């Protein structure tokens, strides 16, 4: 029976958040969790077991890459990394052990854009679920389920919450994937830990929700990465202003990207909304209402230039988060991706000069002025 029996499994505040996120994404149901990282981890182990494989884009957030590259193999789950710039790379990596495909809508931090529709066609051809991390786009810019994704993941901590006040994640199930294929043994073999239930067969009218119900009944119930009601409430407040904030994030980021592209101490700029950016064709075809709030650029002086720029900022905060109402900056090579070797960093597009900006909703003139005074101290 569905209902509120224990807060780790479900509570009324969490239920409202899940229903609203499912509605925003056009999904059938959702499950809120303690973080975006736990949302990704639970999505994987809710599909894969020992001996199974995942085909994943290689331009991932550093924490996700470490999970896929170092932790999942300890559990007997192999991840094959491919460049998402060409959808055919996913298909070439599929084997008879593959159980899911994974990608971010906008790669972190290089801001490459994945063609979700093209990858979803490959997933359907091989009858594999496509799991998409849509944190950087939010439903305001892109609804991956409409492009063919089966599962959508968000870090609620970012733009959906909007103020960096809580940690949380959410998984949205399209309810469209057929789990009765015998290769998905977690859904077709009796679960000894839960009344020998076969999730793809024994849920009656709820069979289309087999994925999200199993995630609640197995990983969440037994591993416990639950969201607190207080955090769920904070995210509900943030979602109410999502459209207004995203409009400002997108317009400010577009202005900042153009400003940086003309600055003499900036070597290069990546922003999907610049017509010169290699991601622009895919982004303009898939996104609505803008191109997001993230800008990355290469500063003169390599690593030293990046460190100098960060140290001189006054308005923009030096924080590892993204998606706050306030502008944030980070130097990934020495912070968010520092656990990776230099070879792994470069393979993911992270160069020593790369600075990542999460452009906030302040007056854009103030943002550009702070960037300019910080760049003044950088040696060419």
Image: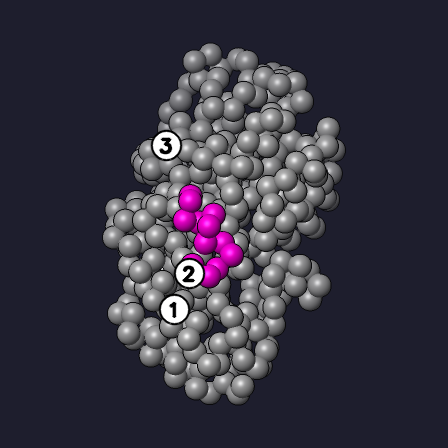
Q: Residue at x 60, y 26 (%)?
A: 125
Question: Where does label 2 land, which residue?
Answer: 274
| Structural distance between the alpha carbons of marks 1 and 2 | 8 Å
Question: Where does label 3 land, which residue?
Answer: 26
Return the mark for residue 115: none
Q: Residue at x 73, y 44 (%)?
A: 74
377 versus 342 height, above or below:
below
344 versus 261 height, above or below:
above
Quadrant location of the N terminus?
top left
**Element class at badge 2:** loop
| Structural distance between the alpha carbons of marks 3 and 1 | 34 Å
- In magenta, the rendered stretch is 275-286
CB within 8 Å, label 1 to label 2:
yes
The stretch drawn in magenta includes residue 281 = yes
The quarter holding residue 334 reads: bottom right
Residue 129 visible in the shown view: no
CB within 8 Å, label 2 to label 3:
no
CB within 8 Å, label 3 to label 1:
no
Colour scheme of the picture: one colour
**Element class at badge 1:** helix
Q: Residues within 10 Å of mark 1 (few under 14, many from 20)?
A: some
Q: Residues within 10 Å of mark 2 (few under 14, many from 20)?
A: some
Decide if residue 379 is on the left or right side of residue 229.
right
Q: Earlier in the sequence, mark 2 or mark 3?
A: 3
């Amino acid at each position: 029976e569905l209902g509120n029996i224990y807060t780790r499994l479900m509570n009324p505040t969490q239920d409202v958040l899940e229903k609203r996120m499912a509605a925003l994404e056009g999904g059938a149901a959702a499950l809120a969790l303690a973080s975006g990282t736990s949302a990704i981890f639970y999505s994987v182990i809710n599909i894969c077991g020992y001996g199974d494989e995942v085909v994943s884009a290689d331009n991932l957030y550093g924490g996700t890459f470490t999970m896929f590259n170092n932790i999942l193999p300890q559990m007997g789950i192999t991840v094959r990394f491919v460049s998402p710039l060409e959808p055919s790379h996913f298909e070439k990596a599929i084997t008879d052990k593959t159980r899911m495909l994974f990608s971010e809508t906008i790669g972190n931090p290089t801001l490459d854009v994945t063609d979700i529709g093209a990858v979803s066609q490959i997933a359907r051809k091989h009858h594999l679920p496509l799991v998409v991390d849509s944190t950087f786009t939010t439903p305001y810019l892109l609804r991956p389920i409409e492009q063919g994704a089966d599962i959508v993941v968000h870090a609620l901590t970012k733009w959906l919450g909007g103020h960096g006040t809580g940690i949380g994640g959410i998984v949205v199930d399209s309810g469209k994937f057929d789990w009765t294929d015998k290769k998905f043994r977690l859904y077709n073999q009796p679960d000894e830990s839960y009344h020998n239930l076969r999730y793809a067969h024994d849920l009656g009218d709820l069979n289309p929700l087999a994925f999200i119900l199993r995630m609640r009944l197995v990983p969440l119930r037994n591993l416990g990465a639950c969201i607190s009601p207080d955090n769920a409430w904070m995210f509900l407040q943030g979602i109410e202003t999502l459209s207004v904030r995203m409009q400002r994030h997108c317009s400010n980021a577009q202005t900042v990207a153009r400003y940086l592209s003309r600055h003499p101490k900036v070597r290069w700029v990546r922003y999907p909304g610049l017509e010169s950016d290699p991601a622009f064709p895919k982004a303009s075809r898939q996104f609505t209402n803008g191109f997001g709030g993230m800008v990355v650029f290469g500063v003169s002086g390599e690593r030293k230039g990046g460190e100098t720029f960060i140290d001189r900022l006054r308005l923009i905060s030096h924080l590892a988060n993204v998606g706050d109402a306030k502008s944030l900056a980070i130097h990934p090579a020495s912070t968010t991706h520092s656990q990776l070797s230099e070879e792994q960093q470069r393979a993911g597009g992270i160069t020593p000069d790369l600075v990542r900006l999460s452009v906030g909703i302040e007056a854009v003139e103030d943002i550009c002025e702070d960037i300019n005074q910080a760049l003044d101290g950088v040696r060419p």
